[in-house]
Amino acid sequence: MLRIVAERLLGFLVALLATAVAAFVLLDIVPGDPALNMLGTEAREDTLAAARALLGLDRPAHERLLIWLAGLPFGEFGVSFRYRVPIADLVAEAAAVTVPLAMLAMALAVCTALPLALVSVLRPRGAVDWAVGLLSQLSLAVPNFWLGLLLILLFSISLGWLPAGGFPGWSGGIWPALSALLLPAVALAAPQAGILARVARAALLETLAEPYIRTARAKGLSRAAVLFRHALRNALPPVVTVAGVQFSVMLAGSIIVENLFVLPGLGRLTFQAIQQNDLILVRNTVLLLAAAVMLVNMLVDIAYAAIDPRLRAR
């Protein structure tokens, strides 16, 4: 198990380094003059010179890259060109929204998908199984931004139960903050719950066809007892893998939902940085989102090995 953890950690570090170099090359070297891209072609030469000095463009590219890479482990991402504040502070404030949002959406997806899958496989091709399949198809067919609009119309405008957008901050209390995240979390979780329910159902049906399951049934155990005691754990590896990928999607792909609900998260911060040509902020937020995705995938691989002993034996 330690060997698997060491291998995954080494792969994570190598992939993170390659991503950092690629982000630096694409945003600081390939487009030409970053200062000109930020200020526009109408900027005066003295203004461009001041911007180049502020961005460190008077140094060679490899030196700028090494300085940036050396500061990353210590959270020294530089200063935003537009906001004039440390990027670490902007990212910390945005992550305090995006990470809880993704975790809440993932919890809703899992807590919805697994019970639906368990109920559907108790009587395959029955009425409940058909209804679960139809519900999964509907959740996949509805775009999350359209579902978010419907949720706003119903729960915010018509019923007035939940806020339509904005985020009051965690300092104002847990419930006001969670209530602001609930509707966007549902909008994010719905399509992922449909995918997860289908994967869990297929994995459970495949596991229930194994010989040891027939042996357990022959001993007199009920179908529900066999399902929960023997089949569920062996069906978890593909479910965990898909759930990890979905969590990565929620972290990195929440830009539409965050803009719809006006949430000051990482997705909205990255979108605003792109609009404002703040290339330093774009570079760092892209790297952090990529690092979060790779970290989740690494943890999923480790969890997969912890669940399936066959992987530890290799």
Image (cartoon, rainbow, N blue to C red):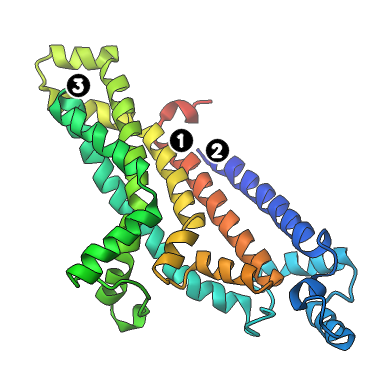
Q: Please tell me the numbered disc located at residue 94.
A: none
SS for dot 1 = helix
Outermost residue on the bottom side: it is 46
Mark 2 vs mark 3: in front: 3
Where is residue 240 drawn, in percent x and y?
39, 39
Three-letter amino acid code of the residue under disc 3: Arg
> Mark number for residue 4?
2
Q: Is mark 3 on a helix, strand or loop?
A: loop
- Residue type at numbered disc 2: Ile
Measured in 3D between alpha carbons, the distance from the residue under mark 1 to the one under mark 2, in whole angstroms, is 8 Å
Residue at 45% across, 25% down: 310
> Residue at 86% across / 63% down in the picture?
62
Does the residue at mark 1 contact the one at mark 2 (Cβ under 8 Å)? yes
Identify the residue shown where x is 69% and y is 53%. 19
User: First in sequence: mark 3 or mark 1?
Assistant: 3
Q: Earlier in the sequence, mark 1 or mark 2?
A: 2
Relative to 14, residue 261 above or below? below
How many C-alpha atoms fall within 10 Å of the one at disc 3: few (<14), some, or many (≥20)? few
Numbered badge on residue 125: 3
Q: Is residue 71 left or right of residue 242?
A: right
Q: Badge 1 is on which residue?
A: 305
Is disc 1 surrounded by few (<14), some (14 to 19) or many (20+) residues within 10 Å? some
C-alpha distance separating marks 2 and 3:
40 Å
Q: Position of residue 40 (x, y in %)?
A: 78, 76
